[in-house]
Amino acid sequence: MHAYQVHPGKNFDGIVAIRRTLPAPGPYEVRVRVRAVALNYRDLMVIRGDYNGGDATPVIPASDGAGDVVEIGAKVTRFQVGDRVATTFFANWIEGRQTPEKSKHSFGGLIDGALAEEIVVSQDALFKVPAHLDYAEAATLTCAGVTAWNALFIEGHARPGDSALLLGTGGVSIWGLQLAKAAGLRTLITSSSDAKLERARALGADVTINYTKTPDWHEEVRRATSGEGVDVVIEVGGAGTLKKSLQSTRMGGTVAIVGGVSGWGSELDPFLMIRGTAHLSGVYVGSLAMLEDLARFVALHKIKPVVDRVFPFAQARQAYEYLDGGSHFGKVVIALD
């Protein structure tokens, strides 16, 4: 069976094609024929050696795999052969409060992930995907989809009529836009590209802001919300955006920190939080239970995730390089068909 293995710290040169043999599924395990794998910014961190605290152990990368169940263990009850499924991000976070133990094993991080023709995982590390999605779309639920869900509705407590600010047009932000619109939220989104902002408007964005033309974009957010600010921000920038995200938030609102594409250091002003009674919440993807809720919501509203580009399996390195270039709108996917 063909797969890819990455050597953390070697960047793109560390992405290596390999062959491996999988064991038969255990009593509670499932074998999945992988059809598509979605990439995340976190996958770039893994190849750079920035994700696992310096651990350079080779690993099969990527958390986000969708495909077909081809074999089940003797005691599996959640799936049958032929079911269309996708992986969870964490192998052990099924439900409830997140803990260090539940967060210890993330696919494609410290344990082997989904960038392989087949995988064998626990039945509790899979969920059924909405019938209207193709495999490339279904793979995007695992990380970006559930992260946006967690940020908006779990940590952000957003309700119909609230407002949400999305930063940029990467996978989590576009997922956030689509989920927020389906849930009846007013949406604001930023980008450095007018063309991307036009695409965001086509997806239902109510307010679009070009942050290169409007460097003080938090002031524009305030103007667009009658001076109040938004109820929740999905913060993906980190050092370059966190302060302005707090300045964009209403009193008692939430800034859900899901990433740091501009770096992890930040000049955080505690007075901004005190004066605005703001909630700063870290979001580390989501549980199996959240993914199942997300899948039901996506099925009900017939949401079609935005896939920017699909690369063939043989061009996995090019897919990583394209993601790193930052020109994408939505998700970058590798197809194994």
Image: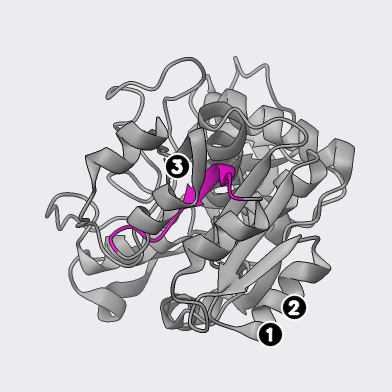
* Pointer 3 local density, CA inside 10 Å: few below 14, some 14–19, many at least 20: many
- The answer to whether residue 24 shows anywhere in this view is no
Q: Which residue is mark 2?
A: 198
Q: Which residue is mark 3?
A: 255
Circles 3 and 1: CB distance less than 8 Å?
Answer: no
N-term mark: 3 or 1: 1
Q: Which residues are magenta?
A: 227-239
Name the spot of residue 11 as percent of width and height, x first.
25, 75
Circles 2 and 1: CB distance less than 8 Å?
Answer: yes
| Residue in the image at 74% along x and 52% along y | 178
Q: Quadrant of residue 73?
A: top right
Q: Which residue is mark 1?
A: 195
Q: Say what secondary structure mark 1 lies in.
A: helix
Name the spot of residue 131 as percent of width and height, x first.
85, 44
| Residue in the image at 48% along x and 15% along y | 96
Name the spot of residue 93 as percent of width and height, x first.
44, 25
Q: Say what secondary structure mark 3 lies in.
A: strand
| Residue in the image at 48% along x and 82% along y | 212
Amino acid type, label 3: Val
